[in-house]
Image (cartoon, rainbow, N blue to C red):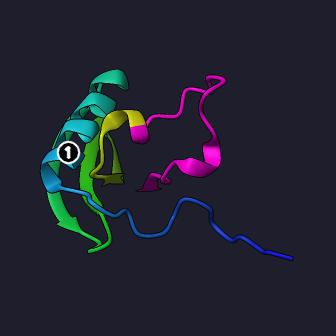
C-alpha cells in the first residue's frame, strides 16, 4: 500500500528561473495581474513571484519547466499526477 501526501509538491528536476519567469508571466496575463519577481527560489525547482491585482497580493511559487508540463487543462492525454503543484500564499 502507498500513501501519497501532497502530490506534485516535490522537487522539479531540470527547472530554470527563465522558464519559471515565462510561466509566471503567462499566468499573470491570464488573471490580469501585475507580476513582480522572481523574488527567490525554494531550491527545488520553483521560483517565487508576487501577483498584484485590484489591491490584493498573492505570492506564487512557479515551477521552472516548460509550460505544457505545468498547465493542466484536463485533456484526455494528461494525467494530473504528472503535474507539479503551484504553491501560493494570500
Q: Which residue is mark 1?
A: 19
Range of magenta residues: 69-89
Q: Position of residue 81 (x, y in %)?
A: 63, 50
**Residue drawn at (33%, 53%) of the image:** 63
Q: Please tell me whether the stretch drawn in magenta is mainly helix, strand or loop.
A: loop
Q: On screen, 70 above or below 86?
A: above
Quarter of the picture containing the C terminus is: bottom left
Pick the front one: 12 or 9: 12
* Image location (x, y in percent) of residue 88: 43, 55
Quarter of the image with the N terminus is: bottom right
Residue 88 included in the magenta stretch of the image = yes
Indicate the quadrant where residue 74 lies: top right
Q: Label 1: how many residues lie within 10 Å, few (<14), some (14-19) or many (20+)?
A: some
Residue 76 versus residue 78 in the image, above or below: above
Horizontal side, residue 43 vs residue 7: left or right: left
Front-most of 38 and 65?
65
Reply above or below: 4 against 65.
Answer: below
- Secondary structure at badge 1 equals helix
Q: Residue at x 25, y 50 (%)?
A: 50
Q: Residue at x 39, y 33 (%)?
A: 68
Where in the figure is residue 59, as x and y percent of width and height? 33, 54
The answer to if 85 sits in the magenta stretch is yes
Amino acid at each position: 500500500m502507498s500513501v501519497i501526501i501532497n502530490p506534485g509538491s516535490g522537487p522539479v528536476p531540470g527547472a530554470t528561473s527563465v522558464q519559471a519567469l515565462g510561466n509566471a508571466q503567462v499566468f499573470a496575463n491570464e488573471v490580469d495581474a501585475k507580476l513582480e519577481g522572481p523574488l527567490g527560489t525554494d531550491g527545488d525547482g520553483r521560483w517565487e513571484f508576487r501577483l498584484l491585482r485590484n489591491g490584493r497580493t498573492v505570492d506564487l511559487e512557479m515551477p521552472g519547466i516548460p509550460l505544457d508540463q505545468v498547465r493542466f487543462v484536463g485533456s484526455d492525454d494528461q494525467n494530473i499526477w504528472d503535474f507539479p503543484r503551484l504553491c501560493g500564499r494570500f
